């Protein structure tokens, strides 16, 4: 590949690691944040759903399409090799970001949902049968529930649920009982609804002691905090590019090499084979054994640029920044609205991420979101793909604001002002 594209927008794209995020400079790196909606400055507070993309990611993808595009792993001509190098470079970057032992432990998929399905269809179907159990938690996203429900229905596997405490954390008082005889613990590192962070290492230790493997849905963790798969001692970790400043269409699975080696292929087709005969086939080496068909090539280049961007900011600085903004938002919401606004998630900043779900008594979450849109404040309303959790909480939907590297106090203030307008609007 040629020289790595850099932003000339005066942002942080080409700077070195910052201790404290310069949000004004970061905002300049995201072209969409320059636009207005309904005549107002765009206030994007839906990064838990999908993040915006910096110019450097857009440039990297544009450059790949313009100057280096060809299919990967096939051609021996120059641009095919450049395209392959760029794709594989993304794998190296993700392996480094996650602390993987080797690049062969990173399998690219189209998103975390596909990564979890890969484990469900390959590892779980090879290893679980009637009478086995999988432990999930009540705060999981549908992506970490439904693949196991499909398996449970097909195989007679039991699904057990770790409940929640009143403080919106996992109630681990019966963990050993739930893990007894289980083959897998499937848990998210950070809830997309509650914002709760789960301490993975003790969960992994307990699961391993019970003879179960551990799958971590890290969709919300990888963009926001340091993830080290070795420190977690997990067996499978899923991530998704579009929440971490990268493009949609690419995500992946980290898994221990020996597990990937032993697992049967998931999808069949081109790329994942070494040989095909009329009487059968042999699979490619890992990770390509799990990468059937033409992969999201240019998206991988965009993901690599996203990792570069995050690393330039410093993932610890990103995490600290989000803690500050979230603490500011929790306080501002409480101060302004008091008991009229219920937050579904931990009130304390330790052990929580930046997603804040809430409800005003008597006002539907969707109505709030619609009024906020008039002020160009983008928040998510709904069940957030966590309907079992909504049932536990006893609500059909919540409004959720979530913060990322390009949000600062002015965005929180805009949220609070717009919420005050909405509250007044719906007052009877
Ligand atoms: C915790 C969690 N898991 C899984 C997903 C699914 O991500 P994707 O649609 O990229 O597969 C999400 C997306 O909201 C999420 O927040």
Image (cartoon, helix red, strand yellow):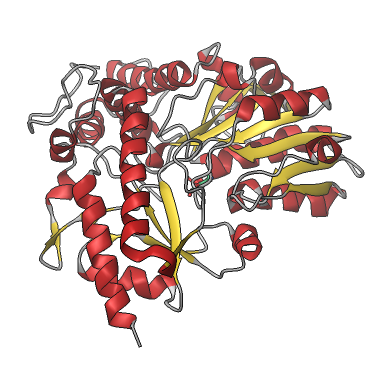
User: What residue occupies the far top of the structure in this picture?
Assistant: 101
Instruction: Give residue 27's position: percent from left, percent from top.
Output: 17, 40
Residue 73 visible in this rendered orientation of the protein: no
Instruction: Give residue 218's position: percent from left, percent from top.
Output: 53, 35
Q: Report the quarter where the N terminus lies.
A: top left
Instruction: Give residue 369's position: percent from left, percent from top.
Output: 34, 68
Q: Report the quarter where the C terminus lies.
A: bottom left
Instruction: Name the residue: 32% across, 41% down.
Output: 404
Instruction: Name the residue: 64% across, 16% down.
Output: 257
User: What residue occupies the far bottom of the structure in this picture?
Assistant: 428
Residue 300's place in the image compared with 86, above or below, is below
Q: Is residue 347 left or right of residue 380?
A: right
Instruction: Name the residue: 22% across, 37% down.
Output: 54
Identify the image quadrant of residue 133: top right
Front residue of this view, candidates 282 and 343: 343
Q: Is residue 400 left or right of residue 193?
A: left
Numbered label tally = 0
Residue 224's place in the image compared with 286, above or below, is below
Instruction: Name the residue: 43% across, 37% down.
Output: 250
User: What residue occupies the far right of the structure in this picture?
Assistant: 131
Q: Is residue 314 left or right of residue 413?
A: right
Front residue of this view, candidates 254 and 48: 48
Instruction: Give residue 237's position: percent from left, percent from top.
Output: 58, 30
Identify the image quadrant of residue 282: top right
Residue 52 visible in this rendered orientation of the protein: yes
Residue 264's place in the image compared with 379, above or below, is above
């Amino acid at each position: 590949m040629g020289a790595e594209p850099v932003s000339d927008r005066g942002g942080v794209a080409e700077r070195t690691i910052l201790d404290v995020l310069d949000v004004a400079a970061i905002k300049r790196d995201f072209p969409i944040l320059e636009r207005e909606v309904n005549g107002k400055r765009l206030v994007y507070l839906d990064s838990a759903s999908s993040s915006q993309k910096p110019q450097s990611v857009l440039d990297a993808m544009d450059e790949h399409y313009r100057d280096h595009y060809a299919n990967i792993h096939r051609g021996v001509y120059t641009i095919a090799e450049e395209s392959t190098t760029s794709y594989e470079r993304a794998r190296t970057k993700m392996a480094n970001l996650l602390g993987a032992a080797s690049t062969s432990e990173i399998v690219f998929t189209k998103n975390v949902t596909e990564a979890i399905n890969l484990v469900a269809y390959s590892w779980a179907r090879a290893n679980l049968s009637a009478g086995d159990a999988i432990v999930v938690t009540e705060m999981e996203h549908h992506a970490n529930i439904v693949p196991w429900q499909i398996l449970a229905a097909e195989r007679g596997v039991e699904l057990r649920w770790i409940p929640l405490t009143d403080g919106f954390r996992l109630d681990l008082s019966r963990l050993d009982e739930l893990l007894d005889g289980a083959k897998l613990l499937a848990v998210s590192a950070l809830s997309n609804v509650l914002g709760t962070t789960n301490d993975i290492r003790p969960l992994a230790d307990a699961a391993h002691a019970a003879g179960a493997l551990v799958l971590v849905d890290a969709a919300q963790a990888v963009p926001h905090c340091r993830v080290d798969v070795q420190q977690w001692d997990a067996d499978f970790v899923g991530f998704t590019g579009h929440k971490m400043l990268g493009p949609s269409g690419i995500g992946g699975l980290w898994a221990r090499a020996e597990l990937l080696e032993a697992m049967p292929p998931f999808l069949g087709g081109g790329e994942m084979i070494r040989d095909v005969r009329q009487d059968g086939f042999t699979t490619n080496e890992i990770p390509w054994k799990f990468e059937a068909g033409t992969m999201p090539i240019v998206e991988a280049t965009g993901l690599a640029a996203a990792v570069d961007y995050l690393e330039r900011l410093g993932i610890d600085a990103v995490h600290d920044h989000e803690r500050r903004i979230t603490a500011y938002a929790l306080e501002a919401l409480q101060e302004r609205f008091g008991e009229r606004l219920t937050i579904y998630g931990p009130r304390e900043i330790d052990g929580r991420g930046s997603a804040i779900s809430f409800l005003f008594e008597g006002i539907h979450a969707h109505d709030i979101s619609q009024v906020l849109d008039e002020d160009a404040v983008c928040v998510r309303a709904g069940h957030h793909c966590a309907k079992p959790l909504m049932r536990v909480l006893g609500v059909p939907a919540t409004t959720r604001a979530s913060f990322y590297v390009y949000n600062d106090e002015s965005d929180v203030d805009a949220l609070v002002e717009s919420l005050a307008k909405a509250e007044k609007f719906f007052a009877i």
